[in-house]
Image (cartoon, rainbow, N blue to C red):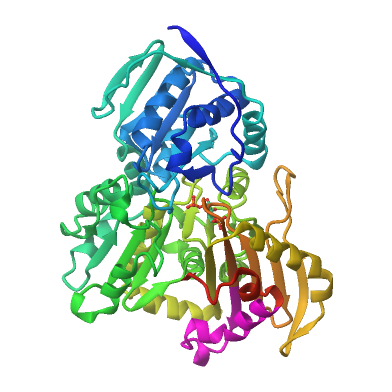
C-alpha cells in the first residue's frame, strides 16, 4: 500500500468549538479542507499504529463523501482496523458505545448535531478518545495549532468502498469492518432499563406515545428499540428515515423546531400521552407530556431523583453534574440524596473526567442533553427510555411527575433566550462590555433587584486540575435568581447570544405561573445590564426554550 503525501496549505479558522469543528458544507467541500483537519487530528495522536478507529456520522449531506476520504487517510495513518456503521451511520451515543465496547483507540464522528443539513447546511467533525468521549480542550487546541502549520496530508490511492453491507473489506493493510450501527447500542440500553415493564406500558390501550426522529439519525435506532424490541405500535416513530437534509427541517428538539410534536401533545384529540424527540446526531432529547414540555433542566432533576426505580441506577448515584447555565434543580436533588453535584462549563467534554473518575453517574445540560456513565456522550434515546421506565413504574403521567417533583423540591423556573445569527462584532462588544462592568455590577441595584455577585465563570477540573476560563457571565441576585450570558460555540454563522434565566419558586401556589411571566423581572434585568436591543438591533429572542 503506497502512502501518498499531498501538499497542502493551512486554512484559517479550523478551531474546534463547543463540540468539534462545525462549518458550512460549502466550507468543508473546499479541496483539502477536510483532509487538513483530519491530518491534524492524526498528527496529534500517537500510538495509533495497528489500532482500531470507530467512524460514523448522522447521515447528513457530505457524510458519505467525508467517510471515504477519512477511510483512505486512516489507512495511510497506520490504523489496523476501522469500525464503520453501515451506510456510514452512527449516532453520537452509539459511536461512544462502540468505542467503549470494542476498546477502540478513538473515534471520528461526523455531525453538526442539531444544526440544519443539506448542500447549504452545516457539517462537522470531532474526535472522541478511547473513553468514548469528546476530546478535551488540551487535545482540540493541539489539533487547532497543527492546522495552522500543516503542509501536507497523507492518504492512499484506493477506490470508494461499499458501506451498504455488513462485513469486512480492505483498503491496503487496513481492515474496514462495516457494522450494524444499532446492535451494540441497543444491547447496552437493554442492560440498563426494565424493557419488560416498558413494553407493558407501551402495550396499554390508554398509553400512546410518539417519537419524532426529525428525519435524523435516531430513526433506525428508535424503530429498532421502541417498535421492534419494546413492541410499540408501528407508527410510534415518526420522521424515522434519516435524510441528508433532515427533510429541510432544523433537527433540534425544542418547542420551536419540534412544534408539531408539542402541538400534538397539546391536542387531546390526538390521544397521545407521551412524546419525545431527538436531534440530528441523536444525543439531545425533548420530553413532552400532555400539554406540557419538560424543561431539560427539570428532566435532569427528575431523572436523578427517580434513579432508584431504574435497574441500571438502583444501586445509587456517585454524584451528578450539570453545566453552569443549567438550572440548579438537580442541585436540590443531590443535596437530598447526600451526593456531590458538580458544576462544569458548557460542553459534554467536561463531564468525561468526572465520569471516568467515578465521581458522577448522571450528567445533564440545559441544551437538551442528559446522559450517564454508560457512555461518554449525552444520549437522546437513553433519556427517553429512562422516562418511559419511570412512567411504567410510577403509573403517573409525565406532567404530573414534574409537578410532584416541584412540590417536593420547589421549582427552579427556567428559560433560555437565543438571539441567533447576530453579527460577531456587536456580540463581542456586548460580552466585553459586560465583562468590563462586572466589578460595578456586583452589589448594585437594578430595578429593585440587588445583584449579589457578578463574575465570568472559570472551572478547574477536580480530577486533572485543568483550568477553563471565560465560560459565561453570571449575574447572581441576592434571592438566588440568576442571569447568565454566553456566546454559543456551535453555530456556523455570525454569533448566537444565549441568555439563561432562572428563579427559584418554593411556594407550590405559584408553580403554575407561566414561565416567561415568572421570569419577566429577570428578562428586564438582562436587557438593562447587557443592552441587547441597542447593541444587536434585535427586539427579542429568536428562540425561547
Ligand atoms: C454541544 C455540546 C453541549 C453543549 C451544546 C450547546 O451539543 O456537546 O455540551 O451544551 O453544544 O453549546 P453552545 O451553547 O455552545 O451552542 P451538541 O448537541 O451540539 O453536540
Image-quadrant location for residue 537: bottom right
Viewer-closest of 242 and 398: 242
Q: How many marks?
A: 0
Residue 40 is left or right of residue 368, and the answer is right
Q: Is residue 427 magenta?
A: no
The image shows residue 49 at horizontal and vertical percentages of: 53, 16
Q: Which one is nearer the viewer's eye here, 71 or 421?
A: 421
Q: Residue at x 48, y 39 (%)?
A: 27
Residue at the location (68% across, 57% down)?
471
Q: Please, is residue 70 above or below residue 451 in the view? A: above
Q: Residue 52: x, y in percent? A: 46, 23
* Residue 184 placement (x, y as % from top left): 34, 38
Residue at the image position 16 percent from the left and 70 percent from the top? 205
Query: Is residue 523 located in the magenta-colored stretch of the structure?
Result: yes
Up-down: is 424 above or below 373? Answer: below
Q: Hey, which quadrant is residue 131 in on the image?
A: top right
Query: At 43% across and 7% down in the image, what residue appears?
Result: 1
7 and 480: which is toward the camera: 7
Which contiguous range is marked in magenta? 501-528
Amino acid at each position: 500500500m503506497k502512502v501518498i503525501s499531498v501538499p497542502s496549505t493551512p486554512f484559517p479558522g479550523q478551531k474546534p468549538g463547543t463540540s468539534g469543528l462545525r462549518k458550512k458544507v460549502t466550507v468543508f467541500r473546499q479541496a483539502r479542507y477536510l483532509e487538513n483537519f483530519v491530518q491534524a487530528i492524526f498528527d496529534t495522536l500517537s500510538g495509533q499504529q495497528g489500532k482500531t478507529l470507530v467512524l460514523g456520522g448522522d447521515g447528513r449531506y457530505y457524510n458519505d463523501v467525508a467517510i471515504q476520504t477519512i477511510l483512505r487517510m486512516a489507512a495511510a495513518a497506520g490504523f489496523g482496523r476501522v469500525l464503520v456503521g453501515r451506510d456510514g451511520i452512527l449516532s453520537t451515543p452509539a459511536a461512544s458505545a462502540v468505542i467503549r465496547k470494542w476498546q477502540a483507540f478513538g473515534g471520528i464522528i461526523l455531525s453538526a448535531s442539531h444544526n440544519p443539513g443539506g448542500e447549504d447546511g452545516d457539517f462537522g467533525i470531532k474526535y472522541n478518545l478511547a473513553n468514548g468521549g469528546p476530546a478535551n480542550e488540551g487535545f482540540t487546541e493541539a489539533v487547532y495549532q497543527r492546522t495552522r502549520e500543516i503542509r501536507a496530508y497523507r492518504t492512499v490511492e484506493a477506490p470508494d468502498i461499499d458501506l451498504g453491507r455488513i462485513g469486512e473489506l480492505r483498503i491496503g493493510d487496513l481492515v474496514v469492518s462495516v457494522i450494524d450501527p444499532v446492535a451494540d447500542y441497543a444491547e447496552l440500553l437493554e442492560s440498563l432499563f426494565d424493557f419488560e415493564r416498558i413494553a407493558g406500558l407501551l402495550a396499554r390501550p390508554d398509553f400512546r406515545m410518539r417519537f419524532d426522529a426529525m428525519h435524523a439519525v435516531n430513526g433506525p435506532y428508535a424503530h429498532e428499540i421502541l417498535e421492534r424490541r419494546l413492541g410499540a405500535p408501528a407508527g410510534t416513530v415518526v420522521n424515522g428515515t434519516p435524510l441528508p437534509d433532515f427533510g429541510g427541517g432544523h433537527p433540534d428538539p425544542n418547542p420551536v423546531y419540534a412544534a408539531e410534536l408539542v402541538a400534538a401533545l397539546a391536542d387531546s384529540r390526538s390521544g397521545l400521552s407521551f412524546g419525545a424527540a431527538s436531534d440530528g446526531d441523536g444525543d439531545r432529547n425533548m420530553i413532552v407530556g400532555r400539554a406540557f414540555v419538560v424543561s431539560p433542566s427539570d428532566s435532569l432533576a427528575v431523572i436523578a431523583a427517580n434513579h432508584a426505580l431504574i435497574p441500571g441506577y438502583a444501586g445509587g448515584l456517585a454524584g451528578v453534574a450539570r453545566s453552569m447555565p443549567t438550572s440548579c434543580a438537580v442541585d436540590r436533588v443531590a443535596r437530598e440524596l447526600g451526593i456531590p453535584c458538580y458544576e462544569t462549563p458548557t460542553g459534554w467534554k467536561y463531564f468525561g473526567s468526572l465520569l471516568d473518575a467515578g465521581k458522577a453517574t448522571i450528567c445533564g445540560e440545559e441544551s437538551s442533553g442528559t446522559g450517564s456513565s454508560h457512555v461518554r456522550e449525552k444520549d437522546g434515546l437513553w433519556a427517553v427510555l429512562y422516562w418511559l421506565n419511570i412512567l411504567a413504574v410510577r403509573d403517573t403521567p409525565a406532567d404530573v411527575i414534574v409537578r410532584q417533583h416541584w412540590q417536593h423540591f420547589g421549582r427552579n423556573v427556567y428559560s433560555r433566550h437565543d438571539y441567533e445569527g447576530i453579527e460577531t462584532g456587536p456580540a463581542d462588544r456586548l460580552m466585553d462590555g459586560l465583562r468590563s462592568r462586572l466589578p460595578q455590577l456586583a452589589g448594585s441595584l437594578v430595578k429593585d433587584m440587588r445583584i449579589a455577585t457578578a463574575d465570568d465563570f472559570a472551572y478547574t477540573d477536580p480530577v486533572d486540575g485543568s483550568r477553563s476560563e471565560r465560560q459565561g457571565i453570571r449575574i447572581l441576585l441576592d434571592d438566588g435568581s440568576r442571569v447568565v450570558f454566553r456566546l454559543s460555540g456551535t453555530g456556523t454563522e455570525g454569533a448566537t447570544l444565549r441568555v439563561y434565566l432562572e428563579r427559584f419558586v418554593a411556594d407550590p401556589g405559584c408553580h403554575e405561573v407561566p414561565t416567561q411571566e415568572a421570569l419577566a423581572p429577570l428578562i428586564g434585568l438582562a436587557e438593562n445590564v447587557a443592552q441587547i436591543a441597542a447593541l444587536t438591533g434585535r427586539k427579542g429572542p429568536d428562540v425561547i426554550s
